[in-house]
Image (cartoon, rainbow, N blue to C red):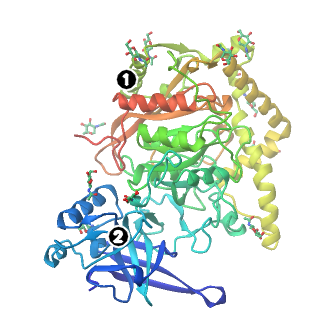
Amino acid sequence: MRAFGLIIALSLYVKVLLAIAVSKQVKLGNVSYYVAGTPELTIHEKLVSELVGSLEDSFLFPLTVINHSGSLDYSVLESVSANFSSSDDVFSAFFLETVLVQSSNVEVASLSNSSISTLGVSNVISLEGNALPNGPYFGSFLEGKLNVYRAYRLYADHYAAFQSSIVPSDEDANDFMVLPAGVAVAHAQTIAVPSKLYFTVTKEQPLAGYRVAVKDLYDIAGIKTSGASRNYYDLYDEANVTCPSIQRVLDMGAVVVGKLKLTQFANGETPTADYVDYHAPFNPRGDGYQSPSSSSCGSGAAEAAYPWLDFTIGSDTGCSVRCPAGAQGLYGLRPTFDAISLEGVIPMSDIMDTAGYFARTPELFQVFGEAWYGANENISTSYTSFPSTVYTFDIEEVPGVHIESRAGPEARAMFSEFVGNVVSFINGTNETLSVYSKFQADTGRNLTEVANNTWSGLAGYYQYVNIWEKFSKDYQMAFDGDTPFLDPIPKYRWDWAYFNFTETRYLEARANKELFDEWWNTNVTTPDNETCSNTLYMFLSNVGSTNYRNIYQSAPSGGRLSGFSDNMVSSFARTPEAIVPLGEIAYNSTITLTQKYLPVTAAIGAAPGCDFMVLDLIAKLGEAGILKEVATGQRLFLPN
Ligand SMILES: *[C@@H]1O[C@H](CO)[C@@H](O)[C@H](O)[C@H]1NC(C)=O
Ligand SMILES: *[C@@H]1O[C@H](CO)[C@@H](O)[C@H](O)[C@H]1NC(C)=O
Ligand SMILES: *[C@@H]1O[C@H](CO)[C@@H](O)[C@H](O)[C@H]1NC(C)=O
Ligand SMILES: *[C@@H]1O[C@H](CO)[C@@H](O)[C@H](O)[C@H]1NC(C)=O
Ligand SMILES: *[C@@H]1O[C@H](CO)[C@@H](O)[C@H](O)[C@H]1NC(C)=O
Ligand SMILES: *[C@@H]1O[C@H](CO)[C@@H](O)[C@H](O)[C@H]1NC(C)=O
Ligand SMILES: *[C@@H]1O[C@H](CO)[C@@H](O)[C@H](O)[C@H]1NC(C)=O
Ligand SMILES: *[C@@H]1O[C@H](CO)[C@@H](O)[C@H](O)[C@H]1NC(C)=O
Ligand SMILES: *[C@@H]1O[C@H](CO)[C@@H](O)[C@H](O)[C@H]1NC(C)=O
Ligand SMILES: *[C@@H]1O[C@H](CO)[C@@H](O)[C@H](O)[C@H]1NC(C)=O
Ligand SMILES: *[C@@H]1O[C@H](CO)[C@@H](O)[C@H](O)[C@H]1NC(C)=O
Ligand SMILES: *[C@@H]1O[C@H](CO)[C@@H](O)[C@H](O)[C@H]1NC(C)=O
């Protein structure tokens, strides 16, 4: 009896040599599943013992694999079901229809048919050995052979954060393919996640089973990289190799489930007018109509929206991880420059690009960073205590420049309390750093002039030369001389940098960046044998103010490109900088006409190479209750 296995979609396609591959989607109760194309196990019926019921020819049926020896009774199965349900979102009681016990000595004597049927069990079969991890699967029994396939739950991308949905390829174990399945959702993706029960975290694979989605700038074998440009997506083929940084995530055991939206080629875009090629992802915080911020916007929106996703990967050149982490109230890291290879990643600036990520708990924030970057020549693991000095910026020095100068009293109080908590946790002191006057005193140069258009000139010029020149030529070759489309922001920035900023000033900008870098790393945060970094620096990075996505913006102009800001320290000085959520500010939404809340976050930085020290400090601040896990959805912290 196959009461629960309802097959709703069955598509066939013909492979070379007329072999037939089948992509299968199944609904159990009200939940949809994708059935992996390649079986995890194929076994002849002679090797299977039928303990209750019997295997009958069936194209597809739900199946639960368990590991048990000795007597199998109602209470064991009930406990397994409860354990699986509480630790996995893919398993449901429907999978108990057939139970496969991996054991040579299992007894079912006390298993009366009536007691099993109350759990929905129709068949119990067993086989010797431990071929499969426990958990929910789909079985197929045809021509005397039992095939067991992995089960993936399908989720709708309601917040439109994904660019593409990916699963392991049927044809090549090292490749991926676009998910051949879907659930109801308007103009967005369906994402497939495998059961968590298939994976066990080990020392070698600290990310085993964690679900990760990746900004669509990183190459993943078998999948196209779009850079959020339709023409770029159309022009180029699927990547042939997975880039080293994403390969590292896979090697650490993580499950990559999709590629995330971004602003075009990671430039700063504001919803909704700037997003011409693709629609902006939805920030789930507050009223749901706030900007997700720029660049790694899909990474921020997805991490804040979906409890079924553990980590998202972004990239940070100017603020591309840190700003979305602020807007969505998440943990986010811009690592030390050169923490990990950026080969196979669409670039913005060869001297400022970094591979960063987002998390929701202080503990997992540390786990992911340590696993992903690993100890390497650019990241230190040797420190025996935390720094005892915290620098905060003198925000009165140059009016309006520092983010904190735009904060209300509540956000300032949250930041001040947090600095106090950190200082007392590390048994240290806080000091004010007057960035502009110290820079002037130490270098004899004016920071306003040195910063000026340095960042935007570096990024815009580099992208013009390293993306546009090739992309436009390749596109013209492929499409009869046509020039490809660019969104207004990258178009403006690239033309401005190449034609108005020019190569001469680009070279000056490189020197200005180096000047700041050398100054900061000699005279502000310096390496220390005991504490990794002589000091920490902190600033208020998101003030909890509104940034509605339905506001008309002015056209791009030079005014949007210049100036020094708190966020430039790490871009210029290569320092690791982490964003941590502190609290929420209430506001009356002009959309919902009710009171909603937006995130307040702080940045914590240290000398280059001190990523692990900073992550360790954040994890310990979590243990001490000073930092907390954030929830998905409208609120960071659920009211209790
Ligand atoms: C799906 O069914 C379960 C019970 O089987 C129920 O708790 C849940 O609310 C349903 N979800 C939806 C979206 O209908
Ligand atoms: C269920 O989980 C509990 C706690 O982790 C464990 O003690 C118990 O053995 C598990 N039961 C089964 C049947 O796996
Ligand atoms: C199943 O049991 C065997 C030994 O009895 C053990 O080595 C294996 O780790 C178990 N597997 C799972 C998934 O519990
Ligand atoms: C992948 O390799 C094939 C064959 O060498 C080539 O035609 C294709 O352009 C490559 N794809 C990319 C994105 O480089
Ligand atoms: C730092 O310390 C001073 C006292 O030394 C204090 O007035 C100030 O509020 C503290 N916090 C911040 C964020 O600067
Ligand atoms: C701060 O001092 C207390 C008391 O001396 C000590 O227990 C604690 O470990 C110190 N904290 C750090 C982070 O060093
Ligand atoms: C630095 O330059 C800016 C812009 O030219 C100017 O307004 C400011 O007064 C200068 N600062 C100092 C300390 O000279
Ligand atoms: C910044 O650069 C522009 C040219 O792009 C120049 O006109 C302006 O004076 C510079 N500002 C400062 C403060 O140096
Ligand atoms: C760039 O320079 C051209 C003249 O060469 C001028 O027409 C244009 O307005 C300038 N653009 C910007 C953004 O400054
Ligand atoms: C650091 O400051 C000292 C003292 O002001 C100055 O002599 C030195 O040039 C500065 N170093 C750098 C790299 O800016
Ligand atoms: C730090 O350690 C290195 C080697 O372990 C040593 O050469 C250096 O002098 C030490 N520096 C300080 C400031 O103690
Ligand atoms: C929202 O509006 C109500 C009614 O006007 C007012 O009492 C409340 O203070 C407002 N809340 C905020 C956060 O502005």
- Viewport quadrant of the N terminus: bottom left
Residue 6 horizontal/vertical position (percent): 33, 82
CA neighbours of label 1 inside 10 A, class few (<14), some (14 to 19), many (20+) = few
Name the amino acid type tagged 1.
Ala
Residue reaching furthest to the front: 105
- Rendered residue at 81%/74% (across/down): 480
Q: Quadrant of residue 380?
A: top right
Picture disc at residue 413: 1
Image quadrant holding the C terminus, namely top left
Q: CA distance from mark 2 to mark 1?
A: 64 Å
The answer to whether 320 is drawn above or below residue 123 in the figure is above
Task: Name the quadrant containing residue 242.
Answer: bottom right
Who is closer to the viewer here, 109 or 505?
Answer: 109
Q: Amino acid at mark 2?
A: Ser
Q: In the figure, is residue 414 to the left or right of 202?
A: left
- Which labelled disc corresponds to residue 104? 2
Q: Nearer the viewer, residue 234 or 31?
A: 31
Q: Residue at x 67, y 67 (%)?
A: 238
Q: Percent from the top left, x then y, of residue 489? A: 65, 50
Residue in the picture at 81% in, 45% down: 499
**Image coords of residue 156 (percent x, y):** 41, 65
Neighbours of disc 2 within 10 Å: few (<14), some (14-19), many (20+): some
Image disc number at residue 111: none
Left or right: residue 577 versus residue 121 is: right
Residue 554 horizontal side relative to residue 558, left or right = left
The quarter of the rendering in which ligand 6 is drawn is: top left
